Every structure is written in C-alpha cells, then in structure tokens.
Image (cartoon, grey):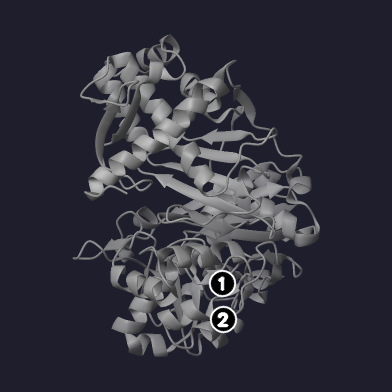
Amino acid sequence: MAGRAARRGCLGWDFSTQQVKVVAVDTELNVFYEDSVHFDRDLPAFGTQGGVHVHKDKLTVTSPVLMWVQALDLILEKMKASGFDFSQVLALSGAGQQHGSVYWRAGASRALTSLLPDLPLQQQLKDCFSISDCPVWMDSSTTTQCRQLEAAVGGALALSRLTGSRAYERFTGNQIAKIHQQNPEAYSHTERVTLVSNFAASLFLGSYCPIDYSDGSGMNLLQIQDKVWSQACLRACAPHLEEKLGPPVPSCSVVGAVSSYYVQRYGFPVGCKVVAFTGDNPASLAAMRLEEGDIAVSLGTSDTLFLWLQEPTPALEGHIFCNPVDPQHYMALLCFKNGSLMREKIRDECASGSWREFSKALRSTEMGNSGSVGFYFDVMEITPEICGRHRFNAGNAEVSAFPGDVEIRALIEGQFMAKRIHAEGLGYRVMPKTKILATGGASHNKDILQVLADVFGAPVYVTDTANSACVGSAYRAFHGLAGGTGMAFSDIVKIAPNPKLAATPSPGASQAYEALLPRYAELERRILSQALGTLE
C-alpha cells in the first residue's frame, strides 16, 4: 500500500459500535487503502464486549469515550507506519453510530484548540469529558423520559410529525434528559453535548463541530421540516440545551480545515477540508448512491429498509431523517427484527437445511401463493409489534400449517409485502424509475431477489457494501469539496462502479400482488388488534 500512497483522494471514517474504520478513496472513486482498530481486541484495557459495557440492569449500555479517542490515535499511527501519504488527502468526512452522545466538560474547548503535536490525543483530552462512559444506541433505559417527552408535545404522533420519530429509548434527547435528571452535577459541568458523529469531527477540527441535519434528526429534538431545534423538545429534556448543542448544519457543509495538530504530527495538508460527519445509516445511503424514488434493502440478521422520500408522512413506526446528500429531501428507515434468522429457521424446517431446496420451493410455487399468507415473527417484531407465527388460507381463515413449499413462499412474500406496506405508510410510492438496491447475506440468493422484484414491481440490483459507512463518508467528502448544497451528489458519484442487475419483475407480478397487498395489511391489523386484546 505504501507504494501506491501518492494517490490524491478523500478519507472516509466510521466510528461504529465495535471499531473505528477508515478508507481512502481516490479521485476516480476507487478504494485504495483501508484499516481498522477493533475495540475489544486492540484496546482490551477498556474492558468492552462488542465495544460496549452492558450494565447490571441489562438496559443501560455505554461506551468509554476515551476508547474512541485512543482508537483514533492508534489508527493514525498504523497509517503512518504503513507509509500512507497524508499530504495527498484533499478532504475527510465520517460517520458515527447513531444516537450515542458525548459530554464535553467546561473548558474542554481550550484543550481541543491547543493540541500539542508531539503528544497523542488521548493524553491531552483525558480530562475533557464530564461523563466517561457514554450512552450508545443499544441503551434502552430511558422509557420514563420517552413518555415525558411525548406528553410534553401532545403525544407520540405529534412528536413524530415534529421530529420524524416517536420517542425511542435510544434517541439522544431522551438520553440527555436521563443524565440531567440522574446526574445533574455532570450535566451542569457540560459545556457541549455532541453525537458520536460530530464528536469525531471535532477531534479532526480541533474545535466543536456542529451536528448535521441528518444525524441530528435521530435525536427526537430537531424539527425535520424547518431544520431547527424544537424549543418544546429542548425544554422537555434539559435546561440550557440549545447552547450546549449549538446550531445544526446541512450534512454536506464544509465545517473547516483539519487542526494544525494533524498537519504537524501526520503531514496532512494545511487546506485539508473537514465535511460534516453524519450517522452510519445516512452514510450508508450515500454509499449506495440512492436517488429519489429508490429503496435500499439490507437483508441481514435484521432487515433494514432505506427510502429516499421527497415528502414524508411521519408515523408511529419507522424513522424519518433529513437526507444526508440533499437537504431538501428526506430518508426513511424501517427495521424488521425477523430477518435472516427467520429465513434460516424456515429453511431448516421445510428445506432440510438446504438453500438449494429453499430456492427450488420459491421457483415451484406461483406468485401470490394461491392466496396463502403467512406472518413469521419468532422474536417480537418492531414493525409491527407482533410475535408468533400466523397462517391464513385464501378465505382468510387461520390455519395451523402449510405444506413446506407454500410455507417458504409465504415467509418470503410476507417479509417483502410487509416492507412495501410499511414503506408506503411513510409516504413512499413506487415510481417508473424506482430501483431497489439489495445488500446483505440473502442478496446472494437470486430466487429471493426475484420475489422482492415481483412484490415491489421494480428491478433489483445488488451492490457491494463492505465498509459502506466509510465509503459513503468518502463520497460525501468529495461532495462537500465540490460545493455541497450547490452541486447534485449524483453528479459527484456517477463515475463509481455501477451495481449489477439481479432481477426484474415477472410478467403479471403487479396483478398478482395488487389484491394480495391490501389483504396482507388487513390481516396484519387483525393480528395486531388480537394481540392488543382489543378490536380497532
């Protein structure tokens, strides 16, 4: 890698749950360097498991902020040792695990602006934080604060319309409220509250970096239409919060140049720009180069849907964020817990553990499954909140079992019909130019992707998303460099390698699912109302 080090380009960073990663992308948008520091393995002194500390109550989950600082020291030293040529870096941007928060102690800004190039960051910033173990997205200990916030603004739906999501335990506003209530002294000694994303950007800037619109919309605090902090939400969470957060900025903003610390210690160029960091999900949207009307589907342990929306319809489920590459538009995110593990269970039960047999069952059954519809939620689902398995025949009567091949198609069709129905609930509409970008383990199965294309009535492409948050961050650095809001992101990334076409809708697909989709939605409502013990 050292031999190819003189390539000009941008760095993309990802401060994720388990590691800090970096990629270097050249001006042709090819990745030519990557490296990482794994918290558990490379920084064992912090005693994390999976990058976090799970507390006795099992609800409180935190990460040591100095571990993230030391990881940056370590990765920069590794890059230097490998011969990486920092002088060729034009700009950098990055991503952070969403919703986590960092609390800078009063006086920390002075330490940040006067870093000495002969000492590592960790040594100079060790006394800069009023909370040493910071809450992260896995924390679910703030139910009380969530209810307080919803009550303060007129209910869950009112909060969703305002901020893009109802109150969620992991969202930052509720985490800040808990710290203010349970540790008021630490809160009062905090001069700045940052997300993980703009905390990391602040390390590079040598001063506090603003929160960007996209990651800021995962806090239950930002008015997603006006892109300003909601005064009602701020008041409900903690006093003096607006001054501790600072004003938010568009995600493609150039927020400054790298601190002289990096110029002197590592040889970054003086003019190397820092583009606002964002959340890992928005950065992945940038990596996939989604455009208006597109969908990205990640088929992993959980299935995640990213949507590009022009005008969202906030709801009680899912999340609406400001779009990280176009400040006029939005992105929606839906998460489904029963993803690949559910597919593997049904494969084991109905196809003798063989994906080949599983695929054969999908090919041998017809679209629409002769009216058989199934719901498979072995763990409590997020969207919607249902648990258990439920099967219905063509006459909407609940049955106890399906033949194996019918079961397999019912599972896959059901998973994709749920995704389409809940996406439409957030304002999504299939457009003539809509394309679906599929990633994750199940995206290697052509027969599963065929069902996806048929249910949505749109072509499916597969894309390689290794290190997607890093790659998306590097793309965003190029975008910021080229003028950000004044330049279409799609013009910047059009030279990147194109995803491969994997499936197109079968003839007759739209007719097959036209009748089935509203039926699926109706049956889902029926199961939900039974689960609640009430009829809506």
Q: Residue at image x 29%, y 25%?
A: 346
Q: Position of residue 187 (x, y in %)?
A: 39, 85
In this rendered view, identify the residue nearer to me: 11 or 301. Answer: 301
Mark 2, residue position:
112
Task: Answer yes or no: is residue 84 visible.
Answer: no
Question: Which quadrant holds residue 188?
Answer: bottom left
Q: Is residue 250 left or right of residue 492?
A: left
Please name the amino acid that badge 2 sits on.
Leu
Seen in the picture, residue 460 relative to 251 is either above or below; the reply is above
Provide residue 296's location: percent of width, then percent of height. 56, 40
User: What is the number of the mark on residue 296?
Assistant: none
In the rendered image, which quarter contains the N terminus?
top right
Label 1, on which residue?
203
Question: In the image, what residue occupies the spot 46% across and 56% down?
Answer: 16
Q: Tags 1 and 2 in contact by the CB under 8 Å rule?
A: yes
Does residue 535 appear left or right of residue 498 in this picture? left
The answer for how far apart the CA atoms under marks 1 and 2 are is: 7 Å
Frontmost residue, 207 versus 399: 399
Q: Which element is circle 2 on?
A: helix
